[in-house]
């Protein structure tokens, strides 16, 4: 191998794959070898492929410090990398009128204070999503790893992505379609608080039908959430904005919430996503639909 010109990462990859660089170079009629000449990576390289060429000594360019990734963050990172690499995902962008929700929340404020509870907009989103998953069963499903069977679920569990100091956690609200707004709001507060304190158990984080990731309190107008396998879709929410809606020649300011639905195109097509979001935005626009 010494007569072959190759980078250290290429030589390391050749060793990992059991490839003799000299023989490979002779077969190709080459003297200089790169990582791309070694073909497919082994299973050890992971679903995201070979990243040996990312192994850079950054300190040669300036001062650096190192921060180890927690075990929790490492597991999440591998799962997200696999999802992004293997799932042909598409994101459908939409928005919903939240005028009625905000008016309803304001009217219920005295009751919320009496209950010692907080009725957030997120509770309405969980309720709306639960009803949509009952109406559109293909979204409440999982594809088997071989891609040959769709598992349709007769339950509705909603995952809530929570940003914590130790990484992203996704506790789950079980049977959300059977619960009222106050109960959903209470569970969101409880799960989010315990997630921050790292007191959510493993049995409270698995088996979601679909996940909501909410950036509404932070900002942004749109983003592309990554599907959280084995789910087939994920709903992103960003900060509510005031949009001018024209009624004939009369402009009217309307608070609208941006919505971003990412979905696995192997299971869901664009028309499915559009119908799903049309139904969802109608529920959000008139919360009375969620009280039936």
Image (spheres, helix red, strand yellow):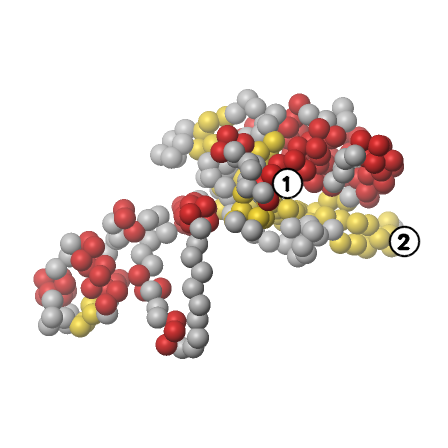
Q: Nearer the viewer, residue 199 or 76?
A: 199
Position of the C terminus, as image quadrant, is top right
Kindly state the secondary structure of the residue where label 1 is placed. helix
- Find residue 23 and report its horizontal and vertical position in percent: 9, 62
Q: Is residue 49 left or right of residue 138?
A: left
Quarter of the image for the N terminus: give it.
bottom left
Question: Residue drawn 68% across and 38% down?
Answer: 189
State whether residue 100 is above or below residue 22.
above
| Residue at numbered disc 2 | 250
Q: Callout 1 environment at 10 Å: few (<14), some (14 to 19), or many (20+)?
A: some
The Cα atoms of the two marked residues, 1 and 2, are separated by 44 Å
Give whichever of discs 1 and 2 has the lower sequence position.
1
Indicate the secondary structure of the residue bearing disc 2.
Answer: strand
Task: Classify residue 180 by image quadrant.
Answer: top right
Q: Position of residue 142 (x, y in %)?
A: 47, 32
> Residue shown at 46%/27% (left/top)?
151
Relative to 40, 28 lies left or right:
left
Confirm whether residue 263 shows in the render. Answer: no
* Mark 2 residue crowding within 10 angstroms, few (<14) / some (14–19) / many (20+): few
Residue furthest to the bottom in view is 61
- Image x and y of residue 92, in percent: 60, 47
Based on the displayed image, in which of its 4 quarters is residue 26 positioned?
Answer: bottom left
Q: Does residue 124 appear in this view?
A: yes
Instruction: Spot the residue most to the right.
Output: 250
Marks counted in the figure total 2
Which residue is painted at 82% across and 38% down in the image? 105
Q: Camera-side residue: 7 or 267?
A: 7
Write down the residue under mark 1. 193
């Amino acid at each position: 191998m010494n007569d072959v010109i190759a980078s250290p990462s290429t030589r390391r990859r050749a060793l990992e794959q059991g490839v003799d660089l000299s023989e490979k170079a002779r077969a190709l009629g080459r003297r200089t070898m790169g990582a791309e000449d070694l073909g497919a990576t082994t299973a050890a390289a992971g679903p995201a492929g070979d990243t040996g060429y990312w192994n850079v000594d950054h300190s040669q360019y300036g001062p650096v410090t190192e921060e180890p990734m927690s075990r929790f963050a490492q597991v999440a990172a591998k799962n997200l990398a696999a999802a992004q690499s293997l799932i042909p995902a598409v994101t459908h962008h939409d928005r919903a009128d939240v005028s009625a929700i905000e008016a309803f929340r304001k009217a219920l404020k005295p009751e919320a204070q009496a209950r010692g509870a907080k009725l957030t907009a997120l509770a309405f989103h969980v309720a709306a999503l639960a009803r949509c998953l009952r109406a559109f069963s293909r979204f409440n499903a999982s594809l088997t790893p071989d891609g040959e069977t769709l598992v349709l679920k007769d339950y509705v569990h909603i995952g809530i992505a929570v940003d914590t100091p130790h990484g992203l956690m996704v506790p789950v609200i079980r049977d959300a379609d059977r619960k009222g707004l106050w109960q959903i709001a209470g569970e969101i507060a409880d799960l989010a608080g315990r997630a921050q304190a790292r007191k959510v158990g493993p049995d409270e984080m698995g088996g979601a039908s679909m996940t909501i990731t909410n950036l509404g309190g932070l900002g942004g107008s749109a983003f592309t959430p990554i599907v959280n396998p084995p789910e087939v879709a994920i709903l992103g929410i960003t900060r509510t904005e005031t949009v001018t809606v024209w009624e004939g020649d009369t402009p009217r300011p309307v608070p609208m919430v941006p919505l971003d639905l990412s979905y696995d195109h192997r299971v869901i097509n664009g028309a499915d996503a559009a119908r799903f979001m049309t139904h969802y935005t109608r529920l959000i626009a008139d919360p009375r639909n969620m009280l039936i």
